[in-house]
Image: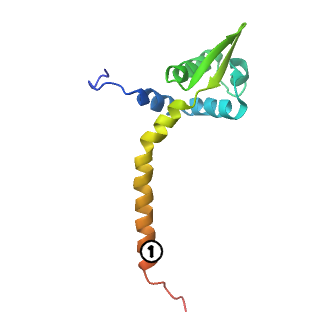
Amino acid sequence: MTTTGVQEAPQDRVFAALANGTRREVLRLLRDGGPQAVQDLAAHFAMRRPSLSEHLRVLREAGLVSEQRSGRRRIYRLEAAPLADVQDWLHPYERFWRERLKDLGDLLDRMPDDDPT
């Protein structure tokens, strides 16, 4: 339960994780570059490793990344399945805006053209 008394949905952690630009950038790096060691990810940011580790923890708890240990190294991998759930949640809003824009296009098509001459 949250402080509002509403039970937290699984997507809530995903949305909270995606709300931060650093975490979105980590996901992009993993998407584009595949699994990477935390040292390699850290090279892209001007922050201390404990701060990046906190971002990685949030992503891991949201199910957006997984961690595998290889000796002393920690390798992070993108887990995209939760993003599909977010896309499913957003789909009705996309449809809403697509219909509104189509209505606007229809209205503009019905309006007379202004002849500049």
User: Where, by quadrant of the figure, is residue 33 drawn?
Assistant: top right
Specify the quadrant that holds the C terminus: bottom right
Farthest bottom residue in view: 117
Up-down: is 91 above or below 42? below
x and y percent of residue 98 in the render?
A: 45, 58
Please tell me whether residue 21 is drawn above or below residue 50 in the rendered image. Answer: below
Task: Please provide percent x and percent y for residue 14.
Answer: 47, 29
Q: Position of residue 61 (x, y in %)?
A: 50, 20
Q: Quadrant of residue 55?
A: top right
Q: Position of residue 26 (x, y in %)?
A: 63, 29
Helix, strand or loop for disc 1:
helix
Q: Nearer the viewer, residue 49 or 58?
A: 58
Q: Residue at x 70, y 29 (%)?
A: 34
Q: What residue do we see at 29% from left, 22% from top?
A: 3
Query: Mark 1 — residue?
Result: 108
Quadrant in the picture for the N terminus: top left
Q: Residue at x 41, y 29 (%)?
A: 12
